[in-house]
Image (spheres, rainbow, N blue to C red):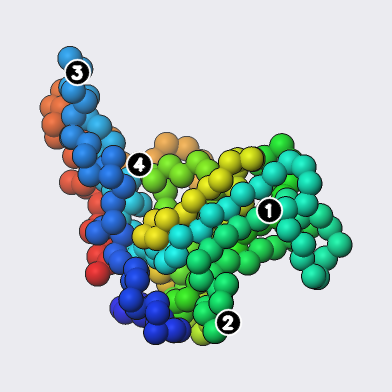
Amino acid sequence: MEITFHGIDSLTHNFFEPTPAKKFLPEWFQELGMHVEDSTGHPTVKWCIPVTDMITAGYIIRNTYEIELFKTREGTTMDHPHTDVPMRLAWDCATGMEPGTPQHVGMHGFAQCPHQPTTEDTEYFKILNHWVIRTPPGYSCLIMQPHYFFEKRYTMMPAIVDTDKHDLPINFTGHLNVFDEKVTIKPGDPLVQVIPFKRDAWTMNIEKGPQKNSLMALFINKQRGVRHKALRLYKNLFHTKKKFD
């Protein structure tokens, strides 16, 4: 299957094109060894194939222009012509300030999604993406903040988009998690992880009682006490390699 990222303006391709997630790993994960460097020698999270599958799944869309975001608890930071609600979210971006240049940042009012994890509620920022995502018929995309980068200053809100039909850029909405502190999203910073998947109809079934002929139970009984084999249990019995190029 093929996923296509189409840049809608000539400037887009001059900056940071989308890249397979496996080529844009968190720095701490790249530097991590396979075992804890102490007397225990316990395996690190790098042994966990489900975690690696999550980190390397799909594609990363990166930020194009430097953005400075700021929200305050008091006062109006800027005027907006279409609302009489005082705004406490402000931003600055090099692009979109001059006539003819593409806009890169917008906003949504808090009332449009009246819940945030912070103690006080403010507007949402919206990064105006310049990539159109296309997938084959029957395939959608899960779009979310990349896990395991552990970004704490802001949160990008996840969504599922039917990218086989939607032919416009998908904007990325988020909220700041800090007050009275300038938050800079630099060019090249990972914004979202895009994971294509096939749409299927599902029904739910619930079963009770012990699972018979469990491959995991058979393997553990056979390999009991063999530590290095037990660590590769998932890979040996259950894992299917995923490929995103």
Q: From the image, state whether disc 1 or disc 4 is nearer to you.
A: 1
Q: Disc 4 marks which residue?
A: 212
Residue 184 vs residue 47, the one in the foreground: 184
Q: Secondary structure at mark 4?
A: loop
In front: mark 2 or mark 1?
A: 2
Instruction: Please give the label number shown on residue 99.
Output: 2
Q: Measure the alpha-carbon separation of dots 1 and 4.
A: 56 Å
Element carrying mark 3: loop
Name the N-terminal-most of marks 2 and 4. Answer: 2
* Three-letter amino acid code of the residue under disc 2: Pro
Relative image position of residue 157 (x, y in whole percent): 57, 56
- Which numbered dot is residue 89? 1
Residue 38 is tagged as 3
Picture quadrant of residue 7: bottom left
Q: Earlier in the sequence, mark 4 or mark 3?
A: 3
> Is 221 positioned to the left or the right of 146 in the image?
left
Mark 2 surroundings: few (<14), some (14-19) or many (≥20) residues within 10 A: few
In the rendered image of this protein, does residue 141 appear above or below residue 9?
above
Position above or below: 128 against 212: below
User: Do tag 2 and tag 3 residues touch (Cβ < 8 Å)?
Assistant: no
Tell me the distance, in whole angstroms, between the alpha carbons under discs 2 and 3. Answer: 59 Å
Q: Are marks 1 and 4 in contact (CB under 8 Å)?
A: no
Q: Position of residue 106 (x, y in %)?
A: 63, 67
